[in-house]
Amino acid sequence: MLKGSKVGLRARHEDDIPILRTELYDDVVNGSRAEGGPWRPITPGSKDPRLVVDDTNQGSVPFSVVELEGGTLVGTATLWGIDNHNRSAHIGLGLRPSARGKGYGTDVVAVLCHYGFVVRGLQRLQIETLADNTAMLRSAERNGFVREGVLRSSAWVLGEFLDEVLLGLLVQDWKPGARP
Ligand SMILES: CC(C)(COP(=O)(O)OP(=O)(O)OC[C@H]1O[C@@H](n2cnc3c(N)ncnc32)[C@H](O)[C@@H]1OP(=O)(O)O)[C@@H](O)C(=O)NCCC(=O)NCCS
């Protein structure tokens, strides 16, 4: 397990799946904002890759996020779009509603940076998020990500076009443990 100061990132367990499906992916607003596509329900027992991990997919590493104290499941985190030629990848995360606003998101980004830069030897990490997602923007910026651009009206979300912000962090600018 990868450990931050508050959370751990471990493999997906069978027991995690119904909780994540109910609390993250059955939520139409959360799903529509996070997926970059139209929400649709996930059938219980389906092999949807957001829930059931395909260990042969080299381009993506999904984790379940747990509280270090007690081990309670609090969400998901993924290093995806891994490009071993350009040594870059994207990160994504989603926390259960009861786990938001406690500093876990910031800690998850820190752990994903460690995994990307130290374990995988990458040199660039990227995050795309909706421009009104203050908690995600702050979680990224707290870890040194900088805003590199705004993709104007790039996301169709529940009846309107929203801007997305693209953030990037290069390994030489990464300061492990520093939280401005
Ligand atoms: C986005 C998300 C991962 C952030 O994680 P989090 O644990 O809630 O965030 P943190 O508690 O670490 O807070 C980070 C910062 O955002 C601020 N913040 C948290 N929730 C906020 C809110 N609802 N509105 C405004 N600011 C907020 C915190 O005060 C903190 O700011 P600071 O660093 O200046 O003190 C989490 O809220 C989440 O899963 N949301 C739903 C799914 C989602 O949006 N995923 C990202 C898709 S790209």
Image (spheres, grey):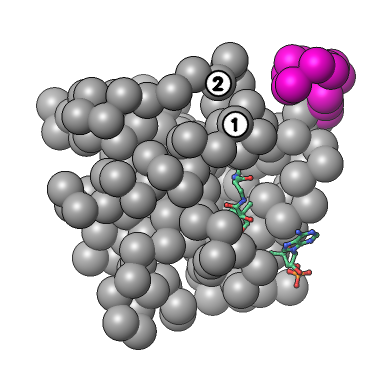
Quadrant of the rendering where the C terminus is positioned: bottom right
**Which quarter of the figure has residue 152?**
top right
Q: Are marks 1 and 2 in contact (CB under 8 Å)?
A: yes
Q: Earlier in the sequence, mark 1 or mark 2?
A: 1
Q: Residue furthest bottom?
A: 69
Q: Position of residue 2 (x, y in %)?
A: 29, 65
Q: Which residues are magenta?
A: 150-163
Q: Position of residue 110 (x, y in %)?
A: 50, 63
Could you say whether the residue bearing mark 2 is in a helix, strand or loop?
Answer: loop
Circle 1 crowding by C-alpha within 10 Å: few under 14, some 14–19, many from 20: some
Quadrant of the rendering where the N terminus is positioned: bottom left
Could you say whether the residue bearing mark 1 is in a helix, strand or loop?
Answer: helix
Magenta span contains residue 155 = yes
Q: Which residue lies at the image location 68% right of the left edge and 51% below the top edge?
A: 136
The three-letter amino acid code for the residue at tag 2 is: Trp
The residue labelled by disc 1 is: 28
Q: Position of residue 125 (x, y in %)?
A: 53, 41
The residue labelled by disc 2 is: 39
Q: Position of residue 168 (x, y in %)?
A: 64, 41
Q: Which residue lies at the image location 47% right of the left edge and 36% below the top edge?
A: 25
Is residue 120 in view?
A: no
As rendered, which of 35 and 22 lies closer to the eye? 22
**Which quarter of the figure has residue 151?**
top right
Within the displayed image, which quadrant is ligand 1 positioned in? bottom right
Disc 1 within 8 angstroms of ligand 1 (CB): no
Distance, label 1 to label 2, CA atoms, is 6 Å
Disc 2 within 8 angstroms of ligand 1 (CB): no
Which secondary structure type mostly characterizes the magenta part of the structure?
A: strand
Please give left or right for residue 53 compared with residue 7 in the image: left
**Which quarter of the figure has residue 153?**
top right
The three-letter amino acid code for the residue at tag 1 is: Val
Please give left or right for residue 84 compared with residue 38 in the image: left
